[in-house]
Image (tube, rainbow, N blue to C red):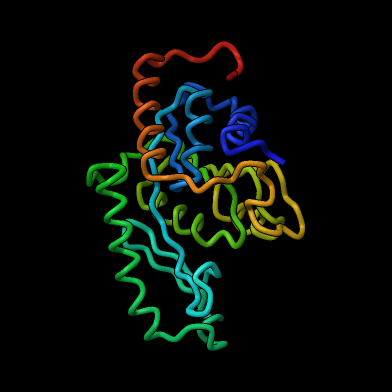
Amino acid sequence: MFRDRFDAGRQLAERLRDLAGQAAIVLALPRGGVLVGYEIARALRLPLDVILTRKIGAPFNPEYAIGVVAENGFVSVNQEEVALGVATEEYIRRVVPKLMAELERRRQLYREGRPLPDLAGKTAILVDDGVATGFTMLGAIAAVREQHPERIIVALPVAPPSTAERLRREVDRIEVLLMPEPLDGVGAWYQDFHQASDEEVLELLRRAREMLAEFDGQIPETEAS
């Protein structure tokens, strides 16, 4: 069990130590993923930004993912769920524009409307505080792939084995600290799993920018504290 998301981020940073100071960028899924990504970016002296996705929740349970949308317009729906009657095509058509509007709101808030950073020739490190089905991370992978990075790496504190394997097939490298079966929810593996706020995310993004300017591209010589 992790103390909190910062603890998880520090542990992941040790797994990713070989990327310190390289042409890489940490892209975190808000909100909780930014807390994990902040520690990775701090330890490895890499830039930190956000990658925006939203899961398409089932009508009867918004937390049950049946698809995903990403900030670049990517939409993926589990057609098996539609065929089983979990959601209708009309429901999908109605909910996707609302999710896209929320992604645009977050893009304005977290990036002041800027698009994804230029990833050409760089390693994109995708980070979240944990995944269950992996739909939101798959959306992030698809959005990042369109930016033609040199490599895509996924870093997660916790994920079930089946989801980790599914993600592994989509990226160049994956690091997962815990792979419990059953998962029993991502929050079950944290002592502190508080609801991260927009204010907390914005503060960490600001601090990450300031630290990167102070590091001035130097490769860290000691472990992150």
Q: Position of residue 59 (x, y in %)?
A: 48, 79
Q: Identify the residue at the far left of this view.
A: 113
Q: Quadrant of the C terminus?
A: top right
Horizontal side of residue 225 vs 77, given as left or right: right
Tally the numbered discs.
0
Task: Name which residue lies at 41% across and 42% down.
Answer: 149
Q: In which quarter of the image is the N terminus?
A: top right
Horizontal side of residue 202 vs 164, given as left or right: left
**Whether residue 180 is visible:** yes
Look at the picture and state if 124 lies above or below 185.
above
Look at the picture and state if 106 lies above or below 79.
above
Task: Name which residue lies at 50% across and 37% down.
Answer: 35
Q: Position of residue 160 (x, y in %)?
A: 69, 56
Q: Where is residue 66 in the image (x, y as percent from the top left)?
A: 51, 72
Residue 70 quadrant: bottom left
**Whether residue 152 is visible:** no
Look at the picture and state if 85 lies above or below 147.
below
Look at the picture and state if 6 lies above or below 30.
above
Task: Name which residue lies at 52% across and 62% down.
Answer: 135
Q: Which of 109 and 157 is in front in this view?
A: 109
Q: Which of 19 and 213 is in front in this view?
A: 213
Q: Where is residue 105 in the image (x, y as percent from the top left)?
A: 27, 54
